[in-house]
Image (cartoon, rainbow, N blue to C red):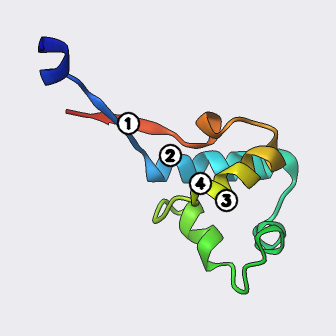
């Protein structure tokens, strides 16, 4: 029972995840406009929200990003621990 009461829960770190997406974009030469096109977004605000740590991509969008960047979702989504 002690393990359960002392468990630190992993939660997504939005800011670090946005920074990771930006690093992957830079490494792959991918622009915000490129991602906007891949996802069929009319406006780039969703991508900017990811990059600025305001929102996370949905699971289906994370799957696309993982394929695009050739990494696992775990490599994209950064986490922090809360008690």
Q: N-terminal of the two: label 1 or label 4?
A: 4
Instruction: Write down the quadrant of residue 60 in the picture.
Output: bottom right
Q: Position of residue 52 (x, y in %)?
A: 52, 63
Q: Secondary structure at mark 4?
A: helix
Q: N-terminal of the two: label 2 or label 1?
A: 2
What distance separates the C-alpha of mark 2 from that of mark 1? 9 Å
Residue bearing the label numbered 2: 16
> Depth check: 27 or 40 in front?
40
In the image, 43: left or right of 69? left
What distance separates the C-alpha of mark 1 from that of mark 4? 18 Å
Residue bearing the label numbered 3: 61
Residue bearing the label numbered 4: 59
What distance separates the C-alpha of mark 3 from that of mark 2? 17 Å
Viewer-nearest of labels 3 and 2? 3
Residue bearing the label numbered 1: 80
Q: Secondary structure at mark 3?
A: helix
What distance separates the C-alpha of mark 3 from that of mark 1? 21 Å
């Amino acid at each position: 029972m002690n393990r359960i009461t002392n468990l630190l829960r992993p939660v997504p770190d939005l800011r670090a995840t946005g920074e990771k997406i930006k690093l992957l974009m830079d490494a792959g030469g991918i622009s915000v406009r490129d991602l906007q096109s891949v996802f069929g977004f009319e406006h780039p605000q969703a991508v900017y929200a990811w990059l600025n740590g305001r929102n996370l991509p949905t699971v289906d969008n994370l799957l696309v990003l993982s394929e695009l960047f050739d990494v696992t979702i775990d490599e994209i989504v950064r986490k922090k621990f809360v008690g």
